[in-house]
Image (cartoon, rainbow, N blue to C red):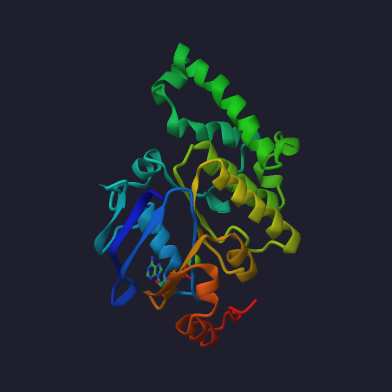
C-alpha cells in the first residue's frame, strides 16, 4: 500500500473550543477511510482543514509529502483533494449536465480566458468535457435527467449530482461529508455501491457518515473522533468492539454503534 495523505498533529480551535486536538492519521491510496463520531466531535472541521476550507491552528496535512493545509480551497482542489459540493453550493440554475460540464474546468488545460474567447484548445475541452460529463452521468444513474434543472432534482439525485460534480474535477481524493443523510435504506445502499465504484475507478475516498451499517460495510478503515480527540482507529470489526468507541456512542444522543 502507498501512503497518499498524511494528517499530522492537526489542531483547530474556535475561541476557547478545541474542535480538533492534535489529530494524526494517514490515508493509503485507493482506500475508503471513514471518520465517525457523535455530533460535534469535529468531523466536518477535520474535512474542512484537509480541503483547506478552514485553516489549521497548528499541525499540517501532506499530500504525497507536500503540504496542502492552509492553502486556498481551489488550489487544493486543483491538486486533487476535493470536498463534494453540498446541495447549497450546486449550481441550481443550471441543468444537471451543464453543472457537470462546468465542473471540469478545474482540470482544464486551456486558460479560463480561453473559454470566453473560444480558442481552439477551449473548444476541444468543451467537447472532451461533454463526453466525460455524459460518462459520469451514466455512471451515477443521472443521465436520464441530464436536461433537468438541478433545482428540480429530488434529494437523493441531488446528492448523486454532488458526487458527479466532484468526480468531474478528476480528484485523487474525494471527501464525502454525510452523503447518505436524509436517504432511505434503498437510496443509501445504492449510494454505498456508488461510492465503492468511485473507489474502484482509482479515487481514494474519505467519508464522514452517521449511518453505521453503511459505514461498517463500506470502510476499509475507520477513525473515531470524540470531543475533538481521536479515540480509535482500525478495521470495522475492531471499531465495533472497541470499548472507548462503544462508551462514546452510549454517552451521546446518537444511535448506538451496534448493528
Ligand atoms: P461534527 O461534524 O463532528 O458534527 P463539527 O466539526 O461540525 O462537528 O464541529 C465540532 C465543534 O466545533 C462543535 O462544537 C461546533 O459547534 C464547533 N464549530 C464548528 N465550526 C465552527 C465555527 N465556524 N465557529 C465556531 N465553532 C465551530
Ligand atoms: Mg459534521
Question: Is residue 151 shown above or below 40?
Answer: above
User: Measuring 41% from the left and 41% from the top, which residue is drawn there?
Assistant: 80
Count of residue discs: 0
- Closer to the camera in the image, 181 or 200: 200
Q: Percent x, y for residue 118? A: 48, 15
- Closer to the camera in the image, 217 or 166: 217
Question: Is residue 81 in view?
Answer: yes
Q: Percent x, y for residue 12? A: 31, 67
Q: Percent x, y for residue 237? A: 55, 72
- Closer to the camera in the image, 213 or 55: 213
Question: Is residue 252 shown above or below 6?
Answer: below
- Residue situated furthest left in the rendering: 58
Q: Quadrant of the C terminus?
A: bottom right
- Residue situated furthest front in the rendering: 1
Horizontal relation, residue 59 to residue 87: left or right: left
Horizontal relation, residue 255 to residue 44: left or right: right
Horizontal relation, residue 52 to residue 149: left or right: left
Question: Is residue 95 in view?
Answer: no
User: Measuring 57% from the left and 79% from the top, which residue is drawn there?
Assistant: 254
- Closer to the camera in the image, 214 or 59: 214
To which quarter of the image does residue 129 belong?
Answer: top right
User: Measuring 36% from the left and 51% from the top, which residue is drawn there?
Assistant: 3
User: Measuring 62% from the left and 68% from the top, which residue is drawn there?
Assistant: 211
Amino acid at each position: 500500500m502507498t501512503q497518499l495523505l498524511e494528517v499530522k498533529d492537526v489542531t483547530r480551535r474556535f475561541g476557547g473550543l478545541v474542535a480538533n486536538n492534535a489529530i494524526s492519521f494517514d490515508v493509503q491510496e485507493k482506500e475508503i477511510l471513514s471518520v465517525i463520531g457523535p455530533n460535534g466531535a469535529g468531523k466536518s472541521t477535520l474535512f474542512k482543514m484537509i480541503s483547506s476550507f478552514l485553516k489549521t491552528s497548528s499541525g499540517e496535512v501532506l499530500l504525497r509529502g507536500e503540504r496542502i493545509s492552509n492553502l486556498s480551497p481551489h488550489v487544493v482542489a486543483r491538486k486533487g483533494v476535493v470536498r463534494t459540493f453540498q446541495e447549497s453550493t450546486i449550481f441550481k440554475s443550471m441543468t444537471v449536465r451543464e453543472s457537470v460540464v462546468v465542473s471540469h474546468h478545474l482540470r482544464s488545460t486551456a486558460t479560463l480566458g480561453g473559454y470566453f474567447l473560444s480558442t481552439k484548445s477551449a473548444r476541444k475541452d468543451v467537447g472532451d468535457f461533454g463526453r466525460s460529463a455524459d460518462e459520469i452521468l451514466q455512471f451515477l444513474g443521472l443521465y436520464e435527467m441530464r436536461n433537468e434543472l438541478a433545482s428540480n432534482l429530488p434529494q437523493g439525485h441531488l446528492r448523486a449530482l454532488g458526487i458527479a460534480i466532484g468526480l468531474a474535477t478528476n480528484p485523487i481524493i474525494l471527501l464525502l461529508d454525510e452523503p447518505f443523510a436524509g436517504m432511505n435504506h434503498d437510496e443509501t445502499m445504492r449510494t454505498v455501491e456508488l461510492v465503492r465504484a468511485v473507489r474502484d475507478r482509482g479515487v481514494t475516498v474519505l467519508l464522514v457518515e452517521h449511518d453505521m451499517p453503511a459505514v461498517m460495510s463500506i470502510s476499509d478503515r475507520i477513525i473515531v473522533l470524540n470531543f475533538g480527540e481521536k479515540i480509535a482507529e482500525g478495521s470495522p470489526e475492531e471499531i465495533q468492539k472497541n470499548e472507548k468507541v462503544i462508551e462514546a456512542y452510549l454517552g451521546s444522543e446518537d444511535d448506538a454503534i451496534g448493528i
